Image (spheres, rainbow, N blue to C red):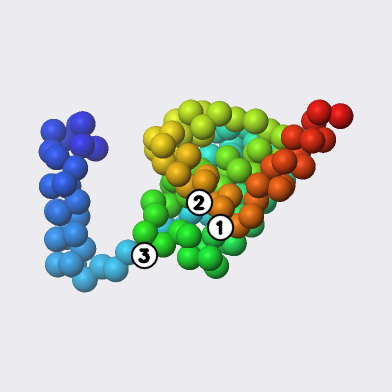
Amino acid sequence: MIEASGIEKKEVGRTYRFITRELGITILPSNPADYIARFASALKLSAETQSKSIEILEQAQRSELTSGRGPTGIAAAALYVSALIHGEKRTQREVADVAGVTEVTIRNRYKELLDELDLEDDIKKTKKKKKR
């Protein structure tokens, strides 16, 4: 939208807030889980990887890891972690491209998820299974 209109992102945001305020519209922030199916489909990930990523998101929400974070970034990172757990390796670059975020965002959210939700062991188990 910004490229097509030639208007700065900041100005679009300001106008959006003005219109919603004037019309009395309240728009809830989107839920990261809403992005999982689309991202998983684009990355050709299994249904069990999708399910696990939604579980991860639910844990993250209970731990208040999602508050103040972009929903696309946290969804993409949860999907990335879940793909690793299920041995469906995708690069951070691939996931970032599908989600429209940077690799740094994926990396940061990934680290937060691993640290806060103790998911490192789950990923290590998958790697050990593959070595056998």
Residue 53 position (above or below residue 61): above
Q: CA distance from mark 2 to mark 3?
A: 24 Å
Task: Name the kind of residue labelled 3 in the image.
Answer: Leu
> x, y (%) of residue 127?
74, 35
Q: Is residue 18 visible?
A: yes
Q: Select label 3 or label 1 by which is in front.
A: 1
The residue singled out by tag 2 in the image is 112
Q: Locate the C terminus and report the quarter of the image it occupies.
A: top right
Q: Amino acid under label 1?
A: Glu
The residue under label 1 is: 116
**In front here: 83 or 2?**
83
Residue 86 position in % (x across, y down): 72, 40
Give residue 114's position: percent from left, percent from top: 58, 50
Pick whichever of labels 2 and 3 is earlier in the sequence. Answer: 3
The disc label shown at residue 83, or none: none
Name the residue rendered at 59%, 37% in the picture: 41
Horizontal relation, residue 120 to residue 60: left or right? right
The relative height of residue 9 versus residue 64 in the rendered view (above or below) is: above
Mark 3 falls on what kind of element? loop
Instruction: Give the distance between the C-alpha atoms of the residues marked 3 and 1, in whole angstroms.
Output: 26 Å
**Mark pair 2, 1: CA separation:** 6 Å
| Dots 2, 1 in contact, CB < 8 A | yes
Which residue lies at the image location 55% right of the left edge and 29% below the top edge?
91
Mark 1: secondary structure: helix
* In the depicted structure, whether residue 97 falls above or below residue 35: above
Instruction: Name the residue at 21% across, 37% down.
Output: 2
Name the mark on residue 28. 3
Residue mark closest to the camera, 2 vs 3 = 2
Could you classify mark 2 by the number of other residues whose Cα lies within 10 Å: few (under 14), some (14-19), or many (20 or more)? some
Decide if residue 45 is on the left or right side of residue 7. Answer: right
* 28 lies left or right of 125: left
Classed neighbour count for the residue bearing mark 3: other residues with Cα under 10 Å, few (<14), some (14–19), many (≥20): few
